[in-house]
Image: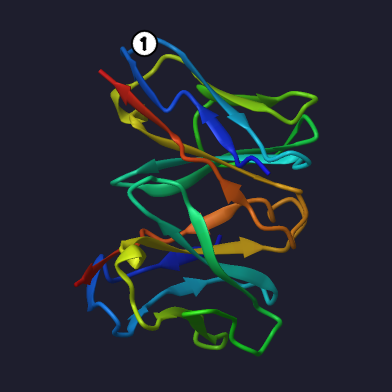
Amino acid sequence: AQTVTQSQPEMSVQEAETVTLSCTYDTSESDYYLFWYKQPPSRQMILVIRQEAYKQQNATENRFSVNFQKAAKSFSLKISDSQLGDAAMYFCAYRSVVTGANSKLTFGKGITLSVRP
Amino acid sequence: KAGVTQTPRYLIKTRGQQVTLSCSPISGHRSVSWYQQTPGQGLQFLFEYFSETQRNKGNFPGRFSGRQFSNSRSEMNVSTLELGDSALYLCASSYGTVENEAFFGQGTRLTVV
């Protein structure tokens, strides 16, 4: 079974600064998807960025980018130019591509990010 | 395009009762997945329905069940409620293939007293 670990329960960043959220995972599969989701106080999970394991290039979405290290099974999220609206809980998640198991997301415990004005 | 809609947003039930939660997916989406979120266990996968068939199931007792209708709307039922069932229940919809993104609703907050 796959596991996702987010070891930092909380982080804080100054507005306009850069912050990196860490995530490690464990799997025996060679192909899979990794995601970062944001959950603001409204509770709705919002996809921030996704990475396909077979792609070497790190995904980027505007101020959000990842550092995907497949051999180390590490998947960190970098938020540049942090904004007050980035304050939320962030979850790292894994999804298999194996038929019959690919509908399930396995989540880490999450990290609460606060942004200081 | 309307998002994923979950009803009700909040529920308070008594131990031993049963409850039904509803999830209306985004138009055109055929897959609906359910997750339970608690402070202690985090987000855990309950089950997934695709075209009215349960396609995947997590490790929850049989008190947790679901179904999907021909219009892709899904319901989740919990029977004989326990205090530990208090949680945020999230549903997510997608087109159902591995490449497709899952979109989440705002959840139903269930409190069992």
Identify which residue is drawn at 39% across, 45% down: A43
Furthest residue to the left?
A: A116
Residue B74 or residue B47, whichever sits in front: B74
Label 1 neighbourhood size at 10 Å, few (<14), some (14-19), many (20+)? some
Q: Which residue is mark 1?
A: B16
Identify which residue is drawn at 29% across, 46% down: B39
Instruction: Report x, y in % for residue A72.
Output: 49, 87
Residue B17 to residue A36: above or below: above
Image quarter of the N terminus of chain B = top right
Identify which residue is drawn at 52% across, 57% down: A106
Q: Tell me the SS state at disc 1.
A: loop
* Quarter of the view holding residue A1: bottom right
Residue A63 to residue B35: above or below: below
Image quarter of the C terminus of chain B = top left
* Quarter of the view holding residue B24: top right
Residue B72 or residue B2, whichever sits in front: B2
The chain to which mark 1 is attached is B
- Is B7 placed left or right of A81 in the picture? right
Residue A109 or residue B102, whichever sits in front: B102
The number of numbered discs placed on residues in the rendered structure image is 1
Residue B56 to residue A100: above or below: above
Residue A100 or residue A68, whichever sits in front: A68
Instruction: Report x, y in % for residue B81.
Output: 38, 18
Identify which residue is drawn at 33% across, 85% down: A18
Instruction: Report x, y in % for residue A104.
Output: 61, 51
Q: Amino acid at mark 1?
A: Gly
Instruction: Report x, y in % for residue B87.
Output: 36, 34
